Amino acid sequence: MNASIDAVRVAGTPEGPVPVVVLTAEEADGVLPIFIGFEEANSIAHGLDAYDIGRPLTHDLLLDVMEELGGRIDRVEITEISEEGTYIADLHIEGPRSSVVVDARPSDSLALAARTNAPIKIAESVFEQGHQSGEQFDELADIRELGELVEEEP
């Protein structure tokens, strides 16, 4: 299924705030939420905004190295959910001599896709297993709003 990053939000849980990247799939009801870490959430948001902090973050550095070596991100595929509920992703890279598929965390793959506009695919079985109503995520704060609140504190 073709998908896109709808938002990067922060959900309140009994353990405290947890970032969630919300994916929408074309011609499907609901969204696929993937709970991730704060650093990865901020990196995805920076990629979506094309925000340049001056020095490369890890995802920017990886992308720079890949491009210097003649590679490019072809697509990101979220391929399965483990028995523990962990999402599994593949990063498809086109190189000057061959194509490779690299096992990667979905958050890292999505951070790279956000920077390159690479297509995002979700296996239909993964979406069916993990999708939820999008309305519950519309109410959550955007990760960038949380960052603004943190920056304003003395």
Image: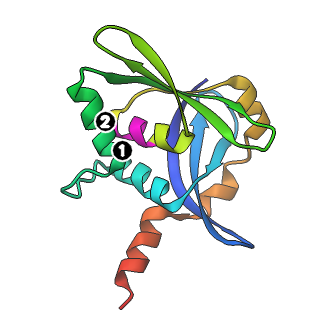
Residue farthest to the bottom?
Answer: 154
Q: Residues within 10 Å of mark 1 (few under 14, many from 20)?
A: some
> Where residue 35 sits: x, y (%)?
63, 53
Residue 11 lies in quadrant: bottom right
- Magenta segment boundaries in residue numbering: 111-115
- The number of numbered discs placed on residues in the rendered structure image is 2
Residue 69 lies in quadrant: top left
Tell me the number on the disc at residue 59.
1
On screen, 112 above or below 144?
above
Q: Main secondary structure of the magenta part?
A: helix
Mark 1 and mark 2 residues within 8 Å of each other at the beta carbon: yes
In this rendering, position of residue 115 left or right of residue 110: left
Q: Nearer the viewer, residue 116 or 138?
A: 116
In this rendering, position of residue 26 left or right of residue 74: right
Q: Residues within 10 Å of mark 2 (few under 14, many from 20)?
A: some
Identity, as a three-letter code, of the amino acid under mark 1: His
> Where residue 122 sits: x, y (%)?
62, 28
Identity, as a three-letter code, of the amino acid under mark 2: Leu
The C terminus - image quarter: bottom left
Label 2 SS: helix
- Which residue matches tag 2? 63
In this rendering, position of residue 82 left or right of residue 71: right
Residue visible at 66% across and 41% down?
Answer: 32
